[in-house]
Amino acid sequence: MSERVTSGMKLFRSIAAAKPKLVTGVPDGMLAEAIMLCEASADFPYIACAREEECIGVACGAAMAGERAVVMVQNAGLLNSLGAFATMGLRYGLPFVVVVTNRGALADPNGYDIEKREAFDAGVRPMARVFDFDASDLPDDLIPAAFKWAEAARKPVIIALEKRLGAEAAA
Amino acid sequence: MSELSNLPSQKDAIAAAIALYPARPFAVSDIGSQTGWLKAAGHDARNLYVSGPMGLATSVALGLAAVRPNEQVLAIAGDGALAMNLTSLATIAGAKPKNLSILLVDNRVYEFTASVPTPTRDLDWLAVGRAFFGAEQCMRLSDLTPERWAGVARPAMIVADIAAAPAKPPALGMTPAQIRLEFLKASRS
């Protein structure tokens, strides 16, 4: 019997394939499984932050030393962190990867998420490169490819994951 | 007032904290006063001058400490700055890096902003630090010697009461690209 590979496992495996020196984040329901797998990994430390802005700082510290770092947060959390993202990540040209769950999609219509998504579109997309993906159908090479892009562009990159209509539930 | 005038300057407090280490630690300074006075205390390729936002130095230092576990890292934060990222103390206490310390320089004002008093000017920072790290890992700079510091477990916090400077520190004079490149080389050597 073959193992059912969940979206959280696929995200974790893609992160691990990029060989980061650290992963940091603040949980969201769509990220919970991947975060727990990262916490259990012996290949890199997972730093659980109290606030999302801290995660950007932690990733910047690793990237300043030339090491790969992955941030996992919800869209509202990244919105809390735009000052750090701009004045550290963009200003210093630091190539880290931010995995964001972009809540409030058509298939994810919680009333408390709608404005987060609208603020993400209005505030984040004009200042940073965002690549969008179906959270239930992630490419195996997603995070390695994101690092290659960020390192070529010399700036952080945002991978936005969302629930899509007709897709398998992603938590 | 006379008691305050006897306090060390920020520059001297930073130099004294770095001198506690047998080998030069990585020093990560917050934007503004800390960055200016760290450079004035002695430029070193192992200095990481953070450009913002205020208070992020402790988080940047945590990330650096995680990827350089065999090196000592000292985050330098002002009282106004650390109050903006107080949750980072909880994160650091939880992460338990064995190579990270925080120097809190407390002059009770926003030195870069016309010395407006900070909302934390009456806060007991020693008590705050001890709440997160314990009494054995949070002490005053004036109570430390290199020998005593060598025996302090990390993560640790040093509290330094300092005098508010009559003027801003000299300008940093480095671009973000220069800071990044110089620090990158130092962090890999």
Image (cartoon, coloured by chain):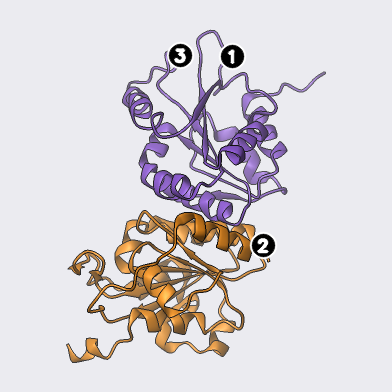
Chain colours: A purple, B orange
* Mark 1 residue type: Glu
Above-or-below relation of B88 to A164: below
**What residue is shown at x 58% (from left), y 77% (from top)?**
B24
Question: Which quadrant holds the C terminus of chain A?
Answer: top right
Q: Chain of mark 1?
A: A
* Mark 2 residue type: Arg
| Residue that badge 3 annotates | A107
* Mark 3 residue type: Ala
**2 vs 1, front mark:** 2
N-term mark: 3 or 1: 3
**What residue is shown at x 59% (from left), y 71% (from top)?**
B72
Q: Quick one: label 2, few (<14), some, or many (20+) residues within 10 Å?
A: few
Secondary structure beneath dot 2 equals helix
Q: Quadrant of residue B154?
A: bottom right
| Residue that badge 2 annotates | B188
Q: Chain of mark 2?
A: B
Badge number at residue A168:
1
Estimate the spatial distance between the alpha carbons at disc 3 and disc 2, rounded to whole Å: 46 Å
Check chain identity for marks 3 and 2: say if they share one: no
Above-or-below relation of B16 to B82: below
Which residue occupies the extreme top position in the image? A166
Q: Can you give x and y, in whole percent of width and height, for residue B187 in the image?
A: 62, 63
B67 relative position to B30: left or right: right
Question: Which quadrant holds the N terminus of chain A?
Answer: top right
